[in-house]
Image: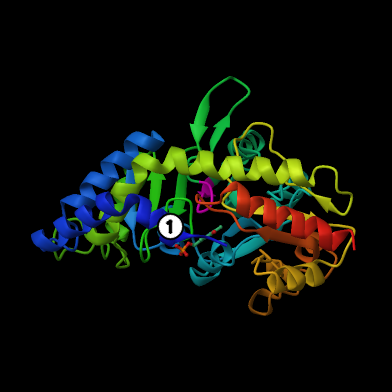
């Protein structure tokens, strides 16, 4: 699905030099590499504050802790997402409320969102699934009307650009009150272990979240709030700082591969290519087809026999997961998410795909469907 080895070989000098520098300095935690990467990421995203943390799930948890929500407060997330989005809500004793997604973009459905708001709703967590932003114009408007916080789960969408109707363009993660991203190795900006970051333009929230990520501490050994221990370590920061200048090229390579897939599959009536959110660019963390005229799992198995990996992100929506089964929801409540779970198939997507590989993948997919 991803080819991190080839990418490493291309960037080896810069990455090795950064790691060697950290080892030589022995500043493994909160060293100058972390500060440098933080600054470079602030410049890249336009976020006033970047708070590096241990991983994307921690970023989401610390963001929700920073908002000072109370037990029982409702937080709305799409039901079609990676589990982390709702997990942190449940862990904090907040109530996850799930909504359906759109068939075309697979992102949060706005009508479903409107219907889910109650007097207990405190925050919306839109997920920019697979690399394109949710309908942030509508989400920010609804949040304003109902005085809700917006925490973007931008774990799959770093570098995606969203343009508002007034012409203003912002990056994924810098639109809501808080944004979260992950540097998990396979993410668009991946490190060589775990890593994540929080974005915000709010000085007060930034200070609070920075303290929470550091045991609730501002002055050493004075703990003002209950916090956690969540740090991006210096070696990961060195890898990320070496990769960040290449992020736009990484995105362009993914977009080129996606355009190749789009062209190859556009005329096939058994597949639907990814739909687009008109106001967002797509950075293709995943290239996800909807298989509508064939059995998705059979296609996946046949591709595997030909050495082509394909993955199902995600096979079970949140409201049907055992841990999140809830008397409030029953099968059929979120028909689009349930249909997507049965038909989505993600093809290999990374920065190193060449024409020969793309041609092989596309011709095998089409050959199997036309058998
Ligand atoms: C990867 C991911 C996360 C979690 O990130 P980790 O760094 O693995 O904790 C959360 N939400 C979404 C949508 C993700 O893709």
In the depicted view, which residue is nearer to us: 120 or 82? 82
Nearer-the-camera pick, 83 or 222? 83
Quarter of the figure that contains the C terminus: bottom right
Of residues 135 and 138, the one drawn nearer to the viewer in this rendering: 135
Residue 188 screen position, x and y as percent: 48, 51
**Is 119 drawn above or below residue 220 in the view shown?**
above
Residue 366 visible to the viewer? yes
Q: What is the quadrant of the N terminus in the image?
A: bottom right
Q: Is residue 30 left or right of residue 26?
A: right
Q: Going 23% across and 52% down the picture, which residue do you hit? A: 34
Q: Which residues are magenta?
A: 150-157
Side of 363 where 295 appears, left or right: right
What residue lies at 76% left-to-right and 71% top-to-bottom?
Answer: 302
Residue 278, image x, y percentages = 69, 32
Residue at x 65% of width, y 69% of height: 307
Does dot 1 land on a helix, a strand or a loop? helix
Q: Position of residue 149 (x, y in %)?
A: 53, 46
Q: Is residue 110 above or below residue 82?
A: above
Q: Is residue 155 a member of the stretch shown in magenta?
A: yes
Kindly identify which residue carries mark 1: 6
Query: Which quadrant holds residue 264?
Result: top right
Which residue shows up at 85% across the image and 67% down it? 295
In the rendered image, the residue lying farthest to the front is 356
């Amino acid at each position: 699905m991803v080819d991190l080895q080839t990418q490493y070989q291309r960037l080896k000098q810069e990455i090795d030099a950064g790691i060697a520098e950290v080892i030589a300095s022995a500043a493994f935690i909160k060293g100058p590499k972390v500060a440098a990467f933080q600054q470079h990421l602030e410049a890249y995203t336009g976020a006033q504050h970047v708070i590096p943390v241990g991983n994307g799930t921690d970023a989401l948890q610390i963001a929700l802790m920073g908002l000072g929500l109370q037990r029982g407060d409702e937080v709305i997330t799409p039901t079609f997402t990676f589990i982390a989005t709702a997990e942190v809500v449940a862990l904090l004793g907040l109530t996850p409320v799930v909504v359906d997604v759109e068939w075309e973009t697979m992102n949060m459905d706005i009508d479903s969102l409107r219907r889910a708001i109650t007097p207990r709703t405190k925050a919306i967590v839109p997920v920019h699934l697979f690399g394109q932003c949710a309908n942030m114009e509508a989400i920010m408007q609804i949040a304003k009307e109902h005085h809700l916080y917006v925490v973007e789960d931008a774990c799959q969408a770093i570098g995606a650009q969203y343009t508002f109707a007034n012409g203003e363009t912002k990056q994924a993660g810098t639109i809501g009150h808080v944004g979260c991203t992950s540097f998990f190795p396979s993410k668009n900006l991946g490190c060589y272990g775990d890593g994540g970051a929080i974005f915000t333009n709010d000085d007060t929230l930034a200070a609070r979240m920075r303290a929470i990520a550091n045991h609730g501490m501002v002055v050493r050994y004075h703990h003002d709030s209950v916090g956690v221990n969540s740090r991006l370590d210096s070696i990961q920061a060195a890898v990320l700082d070496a990769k960040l200048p290449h992020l736009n090229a990484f995105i362009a390579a993914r977009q080129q591969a996606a355009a190749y897939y789009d062209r190859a599959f556009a005329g096939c009536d058994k597949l639907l290519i990814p739909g687009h959110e008109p106001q967002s660019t797509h950075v293709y963390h995943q290239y996800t087809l909807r298989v509508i005229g064939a059995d998705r799992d059979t296609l996946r198995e046949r591709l595997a026999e030909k050495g082509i990996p394909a993955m199902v992100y995600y096979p079970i929506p949140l409201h049907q997961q055992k841990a999140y089964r809830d008397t409030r929801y029953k099968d059929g409540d979120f028909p689009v998410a349930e249909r997507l779970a049965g038909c989505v198939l993600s093809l290999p997507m990374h920065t190193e795909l060449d024409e020969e590989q793309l041609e092989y993948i596309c011709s095998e997919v089409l050959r199997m469907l036309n058998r």
